[in-house]
Amino acid sequence: MAIPLRKPAEIDKLRRAGAVVGQTLEYLRGVVKPGMSLIEIDALGEEFLRKRGAEPSFKGLYGFPAAVCTSVNEVVIHGVPTDYRVQEGDILGLDIGTKIDGYYGDAAITMPVGEISEEDQRLIDCSKEALYEAIDAIRPGMRFKELSAILEESITSRGYVPLRNYCGHGIGTKPHDEPNILNYLEGKPKQGPKIKNGMVFCLEPMVCQKSGEPVVLEDEWSVVSEDGLRASHYEHQVAVVDGKAVILTLP
């Protein structure tokens, strides 16, 4: 399947959807406190983004029941909001999607709840730093597999491992589109499609501690590592414009 090349007007629409995602994540980062339930956090996020003219694109997507993925501690991605109340020392992944005028935004952070350990902060820093290192490396003509190799090196050089079988993705008038962008290299880096100006996609390093093998919990959504240890996740949506990546999901 061909990877869409977006015109400037389309990228502007994607930037609008993405900005609401960034604003919502920044808002939640500021208001989440120990004692808040995941359901409350989800409701606050949905109310905030709706007031800015966006629809919560995750709600109902593939049957997902909420607007915000709330992934606590060992949950890497796709955590379902429950009545669990976050505690001092938890780490919380927040993943949000929006839709405005038929165009989608998508990004994620992992944040501390109160004071956290240095070990957990390093884990969070790994996913964030790997994301920005990959974004800085993006140039037209490089292959997506080369980008996967950069993500893998960024993660493993810090002593962690990427989650297997889950990936970043294209985005535009669909919430998930071609290509799939793994956080590790499969095959050779000089294989597969090349990055071009006008492409829009999400990078989302998902970082585990000892094993990258995924396990889906009984809720049929929450993904953990088989090692049972804490994990982190960061994501931005980028457009390739004039030879470099521009982040569309900044607040």
Image (cartoon, rainbow, N blue to C red):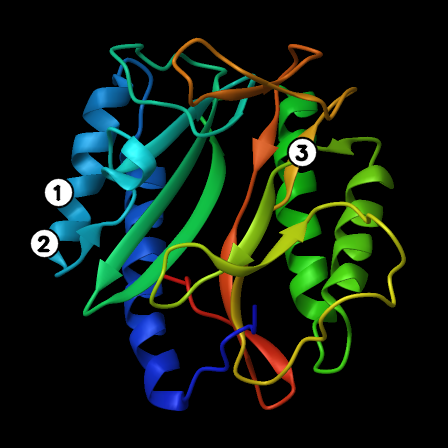
Q: Decide: marks 2, 1 in contact (CB < 8 A)?
A: yes
Residue 190 on image: x %, y %: 87, 68
Q: Is 6 positioned to the left or the right of 146 in the image? A: left
Residue 12 on image: x %, y %: 33, 81
Quadrant where the N terminus is found in the figure = bottom right
Q: How many C-alpha atoms fall within 10 Å of the one at disc 2: few (<14), some, or many (≥20)? A: few
Q: Amino acid at mark 3?
A: Val
Q: Is 57 positioned to the left or the right of 50 in the image? A: right
Q: Which residue is mark 3?
A: 207
Residue 181 to residue 210: above or below: below
Q: Decide: marks 1, 3 in contact (CB < 8 A)?
A: no
Inter-mark Cα distance, 2 to 3: 32 Å
Nearest to the observer: residue 34 or residue 167: 167
Residue at image point 67% right, 76% down: 195
Residue 6 to residue 46: above or below: below
Q: Quadrant of the rendered structure where residue 233 is?
A: top right
Q: Secondary structure at mark 3?
A: strand
Q: Which residue is mark 1?
A: 47
Q: Secondary structure at mark 1?
A: helix
Residue 247 on image: x %, y %: 50, 69
Q: Which residue is mark 2?
A: 51
